[in-house]
Amino acid sequence: MSQDENRKDEATEEVTEQAGEEGESEAGSPEQDSGASDEVTALREQVEKQKEDMMRLQAEMQNVRRRSEIDVEKAHKFALEKFVKELLPVVDSLEKAVESTEGHEVHNEEVVQRIKEGVDMTLSMFTGALEKFNVQQVNPVGEPFDPQLHEAMSMVPSPDAEPNSVIAVMQKGYTLNDRLVRPAMVMVAKADGAEGGNVDEQA
């Protein structure tokens, strides 16, 4: 074999070796392939866990909503239950007051007295029941007229009263938790020489 042929064979072997090394480098080592596979598996497990957590959270939210709906329904249904229980003794007292008159003449003074006592007891019970629910009377005799709480029925001369003060209450007013439910119907004293009919709304 000539020297030229030997050189060609050596060059061919070098090219083949370099190509093999490059191929092994591009394919990567088994350790690198294994690491990438483990990372993908870990990511998939994390995604699955997040899905489970989301489904569990949605289920809990649905349960909370259902419980809230049930609680609201019960609140609407039984909101007046306590109030009604407080008023039932008032009804009982009224019934007893009526029953005490049965079989007796109306002009019987003793019967009339029993009726009065029954009505007084009923009024006291009723007022107490209202107060338990923060219902307060507005009975402003002698107080300055307040258009926020009072409704003037008329103005009348009253030398002994301050002008624009309440001298009589035709019907008591009521507030619930300091909010006006019904204004008091009142008569108001007018100033000397003032024309009747109008009340000082700024009083």
Image: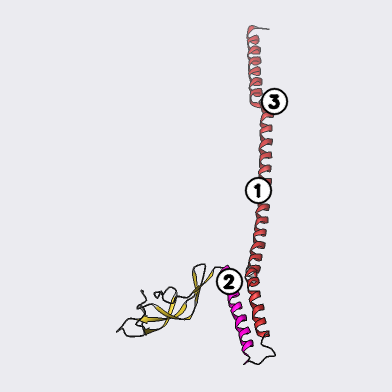
Q: Measured from the top left, where is residue 111 in percent x and y?
A: 64, 87
Q: Amino acid at mark 2?
A: Gly
Tell me the element at label 1: helix
Other-residue count near label 3 (Cα within 10 Å), few / some / many at <14 / 14–19 / ≥20: few
Please name whichever residue, 189 or 107, is drawn nearer the observer in this view of the structure.
Answer: 107
Q: Measured from the top left, where is residue 74 in percent x and y?
A: 66, 65
For the residues labelled 1 and 2, say whether their Cβ atoms are less than 8 Å apart.
no
Other-residue count near label 2 (Cα within 10 Å), few / some / many at <14 / 14–19 / ≥20: some
Tell me the element at label 3: helix
Q: CA distance from mark 1 to mark 2?
A: 53 Å
The magenta segment is 107-132
Q: Earlier in the sequence, mark 3 or mark 2?
A: 3
Residue under pointer 1? 54
Residue under pointer 2? 128
Residue under pointer 3? 30
Q: Measured from the top left, where is residue 149 in percent x and y?
A: 44, 74
Taking 111 as reference, is 50 above or below it? above
Q: Is residue 172 left or right of residue 65?
A: left
Residue at horizontal 37 percent and vertical 81 percent from the top: 189
Q: Earlier in the sequence, mark 1 or mark 2?
A: 1
Other-residue count near label 1 (Cα within 10 Å), few / some / many at <14 / 14–19 / ≥20: few
How was this image coloured?
secondary structure
Residue at horizontal 58 percent and vertical 71 percent from the top: 128
Residue 87 picture quarter: bottom right
Q: Residue furthest left?
A: 193
Q: CA distance from mark 3 to mark 2?
A: 89 Å
* Placement of the C terminus among the 4 image quadrants: bottom left
Q: State which mark lies toward you, 1 or 2.
A: 2
